[in-house]
Image (tube, rainbow, N blue to C red):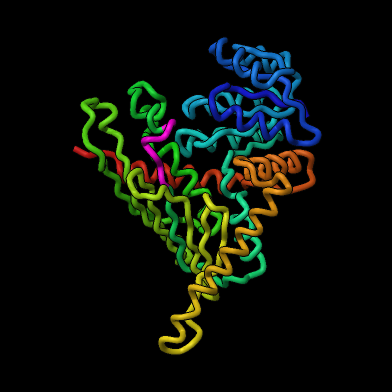
Amino acid sequence: MRVGIIGCGKIADGHAEQLRALDGVELVAACDREPLMVGQFMDRWPGMTGYTEVAAMLDAGRLDVVHVATPPDSHVALACAALDAGCHVFVEKPFALDAAGAREILDCAARNGRKACVNYLYNFESPALALQELVDRDRLGGIVHIETSYGYNLSGDYGIAVMGDPAHWVHRLPGKLFHNVIDHVLAKVVPFLEGPVEVHARAWRRRAASGSALVDAMPDELRFLLADAAGVTVSGMVSSHARPVAHAMTVRGTRDTVELDYAARTLVRSQRQEQPSALGRLFPAWVQSARFARGGLGNAAAFARSDFHYFQCMRVLLERFHAAIRGVGADPVPPAQILMVATLIDTIVAAVEPRP
């Protein structure tokens, strides 16, 4: 398959790295309206043709798949242009600015008989895949409650870019900072929810004022509670201040509970007290340490197989997406889930936006 990338910013390098590792895939084109960005991208990833106009790339590239790695306010127009040109599309998150835009892309894909996928890569991390296996085998029973947390470091490279530039595209998003990261939280829980979903949310700014009205209008703490029609509940936290920076989820079922750490790539069963009195409090710590040790050994084995790199989860997602294009697998992220995530983001943004 011949693949092109629109948008040559930082995340595009992750896409290129994983595309170059896939069998039967050739990265042949890159496009950015800034010529310098295209030139630098091709220096890092030689062997492709560069463009500064999307229409020119679509006309000349003879592409099968287009990756859209631009700011989200351009996703609908670019994804639909690629779909109308006969390409499948793989879109960075957020899939669109709102549910209406997400539906427009999905409808365009259906109309053209093409597939549209979004980069919900963390659903394909090793602990997430292990969780799905447990659910498929009914090891957890009915899902009762999910606790999910995601941290954002405003002192990191990306955080500094957002905080230091009032013109950064994150400030143009309806939900600002949270609109850019909450996909990572919601995409992991949506597979366990049935609509309609009730939403309660609160957001605020914990950091000191910077003096820039635009930057200071951006909250940095978010809490939300979801409840679906089947009685499954979700409590969520997105925090820029809690340390260590979290990326974790706990899934509580009627039979068992598991704890996922996406940063450490571990999934362990929550320990229960099975012996009476003080004796019962002696063993759980040792049992849990053994479970984490097994997880560490599994990660070491994956490292030895070269299956432990930073974007390993994106590679799994892209492998499944290309398999679905070839007709040998289901959509790795079903359209209904893409639309539910977009709808929940709309609801959360509306719940936390400033009021007079």
Question: Which residue is the extreme one toward the left?
Answer: 356
Residue 215 x %, y %? 29, 29
Left or right, 111 with reference to 158: right
Location of the C terminus (image quadrant): top left
Q: Nearer the viewer, residue 355 or 188?
A: 188
User: Which image quarter: residue 291?
Assistant: bottom right
Left or right, 125 with reference to 277: right
* Residue located 73% across and 48% down the image: 305
> In the rendered image, is residue 76 in sight?
no
Left or right, 332 with reference to 268: right
User: Which image quarter: residue 121?
Assistant: top right
On whether residue 157 falls in the magenta region, the answer is: yes
Residue 101 x %, y %? 50, 33
* Residue located 77% across and 31% down the image: 25
> In the rendered image, is residue 2 in sight?
yes
Residue 127 x %, y %? 59, 56
User: Which image quarter: residue 191?
Assistant: bottom right
On whether residue 279 falls in the magenta region, the answer is: no
Residue 144 x %, y %? 47, 68
* Residue located 45% across and 86% down the image: 279
Q: Nearer the viewer, residue 202 or 18?
A: 18
Q: Of helix, strand and loop, which mostly describes the magenta segment?
A: loop
- In magenta, the rendered stretch is 151-158
* Residue located 70% across and 14% down the image: 49
